[in-house]
Image (cartoon, rainbow, N blue to C red):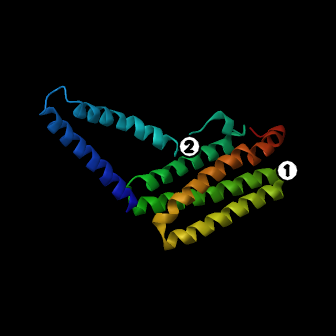
Amino acid sequence: MRKSLQTFGLSLFIILAFIVIGFGFTYGIGNPVPWIMIVLLLALPYAHQRLTEKRFVTWSDDLSVGIEAIDDDHKRLLGLINNLQNAVYYPTGEAFERQSLEELVAYTKYHFEREEALMEKHGYADLEPHKQQHEKMIAEVERYLQAYEKDPESTIEGLTRFLKDWLIKHIRGTDQQYSAYLRGKGER
């Protein structure tokens, strides 16, 4: 509902701006009101881009752990988070939103298992604390999912923000800690 209202509000603004421009020029080309509306309309895509780019996550080298398989997983997770962001902020439909959420949660679990197996294979000393972080994150996601089932609209944005923030902090923090160790064991 919120997405539909936002889209309706933006559409209404654009329509009203064109009406104001049309009527404004009836008072002469020197009337400043239509020119102001034209500038606002031209600035709208730029403002929209600036606001939305903060919502989405892009891969950068500082997120790399130097292990191709793990980096590929992280890139995929960021892409799935961005899909979910699209579902949150644009009217994509409930089916797309649910599918994006389910795919993200499933791939996150898969990635955790894969990462933990790699650490176990090489005898990483801090495997248990790392697993505990994964378990705490999954437990928090499960709480969000329960709330989502009761009230999707008010829950999805918080869930998406949590997933994005947690993943970025986890990659830049804890995942960087095992990186050198696993690379020293020959993982590339």
In the image, farthest residue toward the top:
30
Count the labels in the image: 2
For label 1, the crowd category at 10 Å Cα-Cα, with few meaning under 14, some 14 to 19 and many 20 or more, is some
**Mark 2 surroundings within 10 Å by alpha-carbon count, few (fewer than 14), some (14 through 19), many (20 or more):** some
Q: Is residue 69 left or right of residue 97?
A: right
- Work out whether 97 lies above or below 30: below
Q: Residue at x 60, y 51 (%)?
A: 164
- Above or below: residue 154 compared with residue 52: below
Quadrant in the picture for residue 69 = top right
Asked if residue 63 lies left or right of residue 99, the reply is right
Q: Tags 1 and 2 in contact by the CB under 8 Å rule? A: no
The three-letter code of the residue at mark 2 reads Val
- Residue 111 coordinates in the image, percent (x, y): 66, 54
Q: Position of residue 143 (x, y in %)?
A: 62, 69
**What's the amino acid at mark 1?**
Tyr
Q: Secondary structure at mark 1?
A: loop
Frontmost residue, 149 versus 46 = 46
Say if 154 sits above or below 54 in the image. below
Q: Which residue is mark 2?
A: 57
Q: Nearer the viewer, residue 31 or 67?
A: 31
Q: Which mark is residue 124?
A: 1
Q: Horizontally, is 158 left or right of 66 in the view?
A: left
Please report the residue visible at 63 percent of the width from the left and 46 percent of the height from the top: 74
